[in-house]
Amino acid sequence: MNYMSKDSSNEFNKISQEYDKGRISEDILFWANEAVKIAKITDKSIIADMGCGTGNYGIGINEVTNSTVIGFDPVSGMLDQAMKKNSQIHFVRAVSEWMPFKDSIFDTIYAAQVWHHISGRQQSAKELYRVLKTNGIKIIHTISHDQLKIKTVFKFFPEILEGQLKAYPSDNELKNLFEKAGFRSFKAIHYEIERYQMADEFIEIAQKKLWSMFRPISQKGLEFGVLELIKWKNDTNNLPIRNDELITLFVAIK
Ligand SMILES: C[S@@+](CC[C@H](N)C(=O)[O-])C[C@H]1O[C@@H](n2cnc3c(N)ncnc32)[C@H](O)[C@@H]1O
């Protein structure tokens, strides 16, 4: 079975060199420190960065803790960028549905903005359970449905909200999946952190489709948002746009 569509893999390969431009408003070290607090990560811990992409979160956790980190992702272009950024971390080409790791080896698995891309979700939950040590912790870094509904990006590009509500798992779906896989002690921690983004950054992200949410947009929907952003620039003398980081860490224990 093919666990990632050719289209999706091609899209990630195509944008891999510019991917990090779309993530500059994120405070990776803040999230790395949250992971450390939640999972009590130390320099002795072994961490998997699932769907690591260009390695942002695994690199952040390694920087903060000096723990051993293994990042894995199916897209070679994304992994190439990750390897350029950090040569101490092991980056492996793999999917979450079939992880090339032994049973019970990781203390923590961190999965940032990846769960909505996974097609074999129950199989992935089962694999996460298999490769985590007993009492190991998995942290899914995602956006809840309530958070999606108030995200700034959809004020400019309303057409794509519905698709994202379908793509992103709800807190309930995550709980059900992980409960079925054997996990316990579920906690969804919701964060709302003040952030700003320039209109031009939004325009570049949308036009180059640096966020996957822009892949299914119509030409009309794209033009509408870009025109609204240009209007914002003109009306406000190019003030930054408030674009809070609305994130949910969905945590569970094996
Ligand atoms: C939005 S990116 C997030 C990358 C990185 N975690 C970050 O936050 O910067 C989603 C990543 O999930 C990866 N992905 C898609 N399907 C996957 C699967 N079945 N198993 C593991 N990773 C997958 C994609 O290749 C892509 O790099």
Image (cartoon, helix red, strand yellow):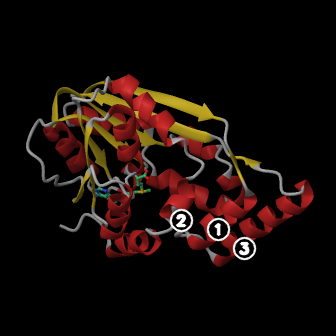
Q: Which residue has dot 1 on it?
A: 204
Q: Is mark 3 within 8 Å of ligand 1?
A: no
Ligand 1 location (quadrant): bottom left
Going by the numbered disc 2, the residue's amino acid type is Leu
Q: Which residue is mark 2?
A: 210
Q: Secondary structure at mark 3?
A: helix
Image quadrant where residue 198 sits = bottom right
Instruction: Write the residue at 37% across / 38% down.
Output: 61
Instruction: Give the x, y percent position of residue 69.
Output: 26, 43
Which image quadrant: the C terminus? top left
Q: Are marks 3 and 1 in contact (CB under 8 Å)?
A: no
Q: Are marks 1 and 2 in contact (CB under 8 Å)?
A: yes
**Dot placed on the residue nearer the N-terminal end, 3 or 1:** 1
Disc nearer the start of the sequence (1/2): 1
**Mark 3–mark 1 distance (CA, rounded to whole Å):** 12 Å
- The answer to whether marks 3 and 2 mark residues whose Cβ atoms lie closer than 8 Å is no
Question: What residue is disc 3 on?
Answer: 223
